[in-house]
Amino acid sequence: MDWEFIWNDIYENQGEVQRDVLPTVEMIADLFQEENVNSVLDLGCGMGRHSIYLAKRGFTVTATDISPKGIEITAQKAQLEGLTITTVCHDFRNIPFENDSFDAVLSVWTSGHGLKADMIKSANEMLRVVKQGGMVFVDYVSKQDGNYGRGTRIEKDTFIDNTPGEEDIPHHYTDAEELSEIYSGYKLSIKPYTYSFCDDQNNTHHIEALLVVCKK
């Protein structure tokens, strides 16, 4: 089985492990409103927690994920909440929308999955579908993260058997220099951020991330 399609099994077997809205999403939603953003693509929506949050904030949301199970649950949540959210199942490296389709793209806890080439393809696709003057908000796992170097190295800065529960999925770790190259030519902000959260066993975890805000 290709690693991309493992997500469906993860969602089927593990269910919704994380339900709380991330502080970074609350922060960027405020910025989206300041920038008069209307349409938002939630790329790699998982089971839809952030899609639901953004829709409640008044944005027109398109929620997408590679997992049919994730999309199914997101659509069910939206229906229960009485929200209108467009849901589409697709690969984050091949976004099935026209150029300049969205005012903004949100992608959290998604873009570090895969090889470096996958990360670059996803970045290029996000920039393609966001409108001129629009904004991309995406986070990446930093080389400063505690899991960097764990598991089996399959290419520079990329490992499998690296993260519990996602053993068969490649994880690529990056830095500000690499991200500056990928997003070169655009107005760019890159800031370090530490995510802290608890799992379903109430164990605390930390992710050292880099937050990218890119204006097209």
Image (spheres, rainbow, N blue to C red):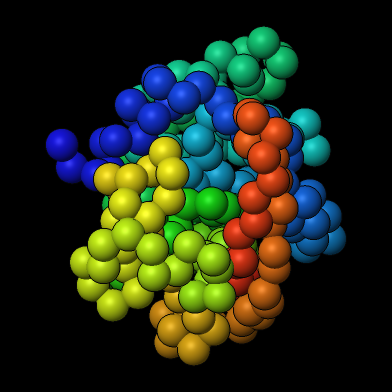
Q: Is residue 36 above or below residue 71?
A: below
Q: Is residue 206 left or right of residue 46?
A: right
Question: So how many labels did they put on this image?
Answer: 0
Q: Nearer the viewer, residue 110 or 132?
A: 110
Q: Is residue 196 above or below residue 128?
A: above
Q: Is residue 66 left or right of residue 148?
A: left
Q: Position of residue 99 (x, y in %)?
A: 41, 59
Q: Is residue 65 left or right of residue 90?
A: right
Q: Is residue 161 above or below residue 200?
A: below
Q: Quadrant of the C terminus?
A: bottom right
**What residue is drawn where x is 23% and y is 72%?**
155
Residue at the far top in the pictured view: 80
Q: Position of residue 127 (x, y in %)?
A: 46, 67
Q: Is residue 37 left or right of residue 134?
A: right
**What residue is drawn where x is 49% and y is 89%?**
177
Q: Nearer the viewer, residue 164 or 21?
A: 164
Q: Nearer the viewer, residue 65 or 165?
A: 165
Q: Position of residue 142 (x, y in %)?
A: 53, 72
Q: Nearer the viewer, residue 95 or 101?
A: 95
Whether residue 69 is visible, yes or no, is yes
Residue at the far left in the pictured view: 1
Whether residue 29 is visible, yes or no, is no
Q: Position of residue 163 (x, y in %)?
A: 43, 50
